[in-house]
Image: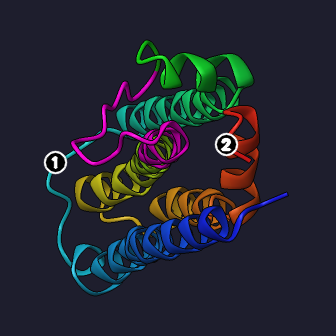
Amino acid sequence: MITPTARETIGETVRKLTIIWMAMLGSVGVYVAITLFVASGMPPLMKLTPELSVMLKAILAVISGLNLAVVFFLDKRLRSRDAILATLKGQGFGAFQPGAGEEDEGRRNIVILVAAYFQLCLIKWALVETIAIYGLVLAFVTSETLAPSMFYLAAAVFMANMKPRDSELEEIFRHGGVL
């Protein structure tokens, strides 16, 4: 059973995170606009042989895949019951200690779990946004639009699927024993 205080905290946290998430998703759109209106009309910043161009695209694609693997690993690991309990003991991810006025253990645990979820979301989104940045780099280095578009599309799709949800935070609260 979710208490009214926990429900309010969850709703407020998700609203704040949604604003940040929208800004980060919107930045992918900015990269697309820069590519279409600036980079595509410029000569390439570097003269690359076709082989080097293919190699650069492949390297950035592999690094993008690694970024996604890290995102999925972090998400699964840091939202696990063990990680959440370690966080509450001050030994886990985001070993955040609330300030004065948080003596009530239930409220203290909520503050710690909200901070940990906030950090997890920001890290995941930053790692996904870097995929779009790789596309922007390609746009300026090669003056192409197709290859960068694939990076932008991947970043937008994965970012869209990472929208903060009440249910995620509720699950974290349940694992932490605050619901």
> Which sits in the foreground, 141 or 84?
84
Q: Is residue 102 magenta?
A: yes
Q: Is residue 105 magenta?
A: yes
* Percent position of residue 17, x then y: 46, 67
> Which sits in the foreground, 85 or 69?
85
134 vs 27: above or below: above
Mark nearer the N terminus (2 vs 1): 1
**Which residue does the numbered mark 1 point to in the structure image?**
46
**Which residue does the numbered mark 2 point to in the structure image?**
178
Instruction: Give left or right: position of 22 versus 176.
Output: left
174 vs 6: above or below: above
The kind of residue on which mark 1 rests is Met
Q: Which residues are magenta?
A: 93-115
Q: CA distance from mark 2 to mark 1?
A: 55 Å
Which residue shows up at 45% across the image and 60% down it?
Answer: 148
Instruction: Give left or right: position of 123 versus 70.
Output: left
* Percent position of residue 12, x then y: 50, 73
* Percent position of residue 96, x then y: 33, 32
Tag 2 and tag 1, C-beta contact below 8 Å: no
As helix, strand or loop, the secondary structure at mark 1 comes to loop
Q: Residues within 10 Å of mark 2 (few under 14, many from 20)?
A: some
- 2 vs 1, front mark: 2
Q: Residues within 10 Å of mark 1 (few under 14, many from 20)?
A: few
> Which sits in the foreground, 142 or 170?
170
38 vs 129: above or below: below
The kind of residue on which mark 2 rests is Val
* Percent position of residue 102, x then y: 34, 45
Q: Quarter holding the N terminus?
A: bottom right
- Tell which residue pokes out farthest to the right in this image: 1
